[in-house]
Amino acid sequence: AKSANFVQDAVATLDRREAKASTSVWMDNKSNIYPEYYMHTFHYQNEGWFSPESASSYEMSTETLFVGRQDAMQRHSLVPFSRFMRGREERATKVLEVGCGTGRFHTYLRDSFPDIQSTAMDLSPFYLLEAKKNIAYWEQLRGGEAKGRTTLVQGNGEDMPFEEEEFDAVMSVYMFHEIPH
């Protein structure tokens, strides 16, 4: 089903791109939580970051885009973090992932360091719902004390709702390429 949804969305995305369709999204921004650039469909993607369909097809889309190498690319981020963690107590280490998307990388982070206290933050409520599912699935597989050590937060990476130096490490994998220069 995910493959069929991806193909259907990919064809529609290419059609929107070729037609130079509007990139506006349906969501209003009366609360001003979203930056102006976020109120558009990225790469003519279905509803940008503002739909469950977009969130559910994201992993298949990026895995295809990166020719099956997405997992390896994301896991590569764990190498410098592993160096950072040398000699540190996992349970006492607080980590923030900014722009967590569907939480896929976050499960890799927790798989390698199951006892860290982690926060996964994203601006899209729909992608956070996918992250919640992915993290819950990982916790179910892992079991035991790994449960409940991740907090999900909806927030803007450019104006984070945290105290100074609240985290020992802050990570971001794919967010920066979506922010205008």
Image (spheres, rainbow, N blue to C red):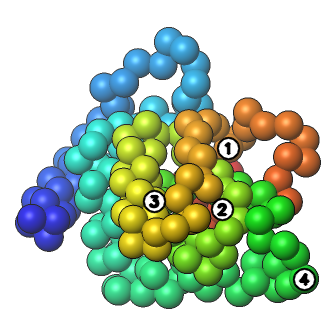
Disc 1 to disc 2, C-alpha distance: 10 Å
The amino acid on which the numbered mark 1 sits, given as a three-letter code, is: Gly
132 w.r.t. 86: above or below: above
Dot 1 or dot 2: first in sequence order is 1
Q: Residue furthest front?
A: 144
Query: What element does badge 2 sit on?
Result: loop
Give the number of marks: 4
Which residue occupies the foreground of this view, 161 or 26? 161
Residue at 13%, 60% in the rendered image: 5
Dot 4 or dot 1: first in sequence order is 4
Q: Measured from the top left, where is residue 122 in percent x and y?
A: 55, 45
Look at the numbered discs 3 and 2 and tell me whether their residues touch, using CB distance below 8 Å: no
The amino acid on which the numbered mark 2 sits, given as a three-letter code, is: Ser
Dot 1 or dot 3: first in sequence order is 3
The image's mark for residue 145 is: none
Disc 4 to disc 1, C-alpha distance: 29 Å
Query: What element does badge 4 sit on?
Result: loop
The residue where tag 4 is placed is 87
Is 39 displayed left or right of 115 in the figure?
A: left
Asked whether residue 140 is in view, the answer is yes
Disc 3 to disc 2, C-alpha distance: 17 Å
Q: Residues within 10 Å of mark 1 (few under 14, many from 20)?
A: some
Disc 2 to disc 4, C-alpha distance: 23 Å
The image's mark for residue 135 is: 3
The residue where tag 2 is placed is 172
The residue where tag 1 is placed is 157
Is 181 displayed left or right of 111 in the figure?
A: right
